[in-house]
Amino acid sequence: MMEMNVKNVPASGDMGPDYIQMAIDRFDQRAASAQAFLESGLGQPADRIKMEKSRGMADAIRALSAQKVTLQHHIADQSSVKSAGETLQRICHGAAAEAGWWTDLHTGEPMAHRPHFVGEKLMLVVSEIAEAMEGHRKGLQDDKLPHRQMIEVELADAVIRIADLAGGLGLDLGGAIEEKLAFNAQRADHKPEARKALGGKAY
């Protein structure tokens, strides 16, 4: 009988989209073979051993089906993160460029080549984070969008600035976020046990 081991499947965070799709295809093939084996014994007198094998195969089919759903969800999540990053970069950088934030106000010349331009953009992100902290510390509503908390709006400003910069530099922000989330999910120093240990990350 074909051996089926679903316990040794790598964690989804360890797999890229191509590996996950390959795993799904492999699971489909194994599940089909398992189903064929199971059905071959139906309608025939079966001894106790064959019935036990059939029950085990049915369990394997169910386990493979559940694993396939998990992998398909992971592919969808990866695609959504990358797509969201691309959309944010396109919209935020497009708006900033159209408003003239990437060109000299007086000469109209592009400014991205200037030595300190990226550093200035990064420090503007920092300024938004600092304002978010101040808004949270004082429990303030935003002065421009008073129906929203200041921390919420300032964090939005920080994201807008980050997406603008990433778009202007041609970075793959969504892809980097996707990969970093997967990496962080497997980090030993991010596990509760490690964080509780002496020298672990308390926050």
Image (tube, helix red, strand yellow):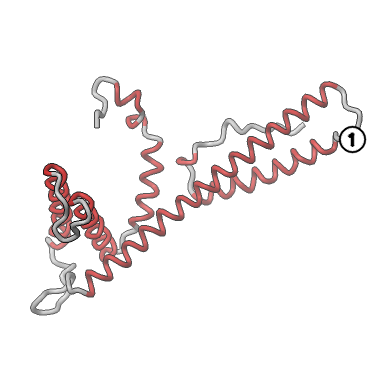
Q: Nearer the viewer, residue 132 or 123?
A: 132
| Residue 104 x, y percent position in the rendering | 12, 74
Q: Quadrant of residue 58?
A: top right
Residue 43 to residue 18: above or below: above
The amino acid type found where label 1 is placed reads Gly
Residue reaching furthest to the right: 45
The residue lying at 18 percent from left, 67 percent from top is 112
Which quadrant of the rendered structure holds the C terminus? top left
Indicate left or right for 195 with 101 as reference: right
Q: Quadrant of residue 84?
A: bottom left
The residue lying at 25 percent from left, 60 percent from top is 160
Residue reaching furthest to the left: 106
| Residue matched to label 1 | 43
Indicate left or right for 17 with 122 as reference: right
Residue 164 to residue 47: above or below: below
Q: Quadrant of residue 195?
A: top left
The residue lying at 70 percent from left, 41 percent from top is 31
Residue 84 to residue 40: above or below: below
Indicate left or right for 109 with 68 as reference: left
| Residue 60 x, y percent position in the rendering | 68, 33
